Image (cartoon, grey):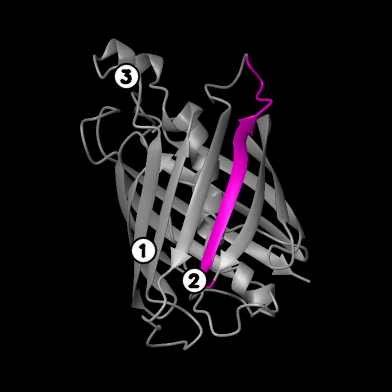
Amino acid sequence: MKKSTIFVFICAMLSGGVHNEVLAAEKFTAALWPNAGSTSIMTPTGWGASYGILYFGGGTTTPQVYSVHTDADAGAGFGLGNPEKNLGLELSVDMMDVSKQDNFSYGFKVHRIIANGTSIGFGGLNLFPEKKKSDADESFYFAISHAVQGLPSDYNKNESKLHLNLGVGNGMFSKMSPEDIKAGNGRHGTYVFGSTAYEIFKATNAIVEWSGMNLNAGISTGLFSLSQNVPVTLTIAAADLTKYTADGVRLSVGLSGAILF
């Protein structure tokens, strides 16, 4: 897992629950939607922010890949449009060096709800990075996400218990780091990424994910939300569980929030 993946971690925490707080479900009144927990850990989903959503968050990973130091990141974004009626657009900015308040990059996602509990998204991450300060690869991806219909939550009849995400991308999903190449791990990941999230408690999901580079697993909860208009998501995960990349398992913790207006 490279430094550039941490902001994806932050964005992913909001991908599951924010949209169903603000969309008026005019076309999909009988659908089940994701709950307030995240449905992925470090990979993007087909869900995205729409008009009336401002989000922000921070995350930390310890230790860094091929290092003994702790990594931290912060970012924010907002949504435009309506993905039920036409298209939603999500724009984000990432600060990859929190201690120096430096090293910025940018991201976007165009997304559309296409069926009951199903959304697709095309986006870019780590765009326009500061080349001399960043190890981030500019990355583009396509993702589709589905809240499985017919498996309603035990806690909210409008939400699903089971959530699936699948995507394909380049850059951070396909390109090994120089350290991995030197370690003999090859030059390319799988390009394909995906995750499965299952509700184990109210607004709380257990998640297993393939990032395109390695296996991650964790728990995400939206139980700490301040109100319906200020959702908060906490995600704790173990990253890089296989020897496919990196030099060992690491702990990732992220906290994100949103303001719905």
Which residue matches tag 3?
180
State the quadrant of the C terminus: bottom right
Q: Which image quadrant is residue 88 in?
A: bottom right
Callout 2 secondary element = loop
Seen at 69% across and 25% down, the residue is 128
Label for residue 34? 2
Give, as a three-letter code, the residue at label 2. Pro
Give, as a three-letter code, the residue at label 1. Ala
Q: CA distance from mark 3 to mark 2?
A: 35 Å
Question: Which badge, 3 or 2, comes first in the chain's sequence?
Answer: 2
Label for residue 48? none
Which residue matches tag 1?
197
Query: The magenta stretch spans which residues?
Result: 116-131
Q: Nearer the viewer, residue 174 or 224?
A: 174
Q: Nearer the viewer, mark 1 or mark 3?
A: 1
Task: Residue 39 in the image: state x and y as whole percent.
Answer: 44, 61
Q: Which image quadrant is residue 212 in?
A: top left
Seen at 37% across and 87% down, the residue is 154
Give, as a three-letter code, the residue at label 3. Asp
Q: Dot 2: within a 10 Å radius of its alpha carbon, few (fewer than 14), some, or many (20 or more) residues?
A: many
Callout 3 secondary element = helix
Q: Principal SS element in the magenta part?
A: strand
> Is residue 41 at all visible to an observer of this figure?
no
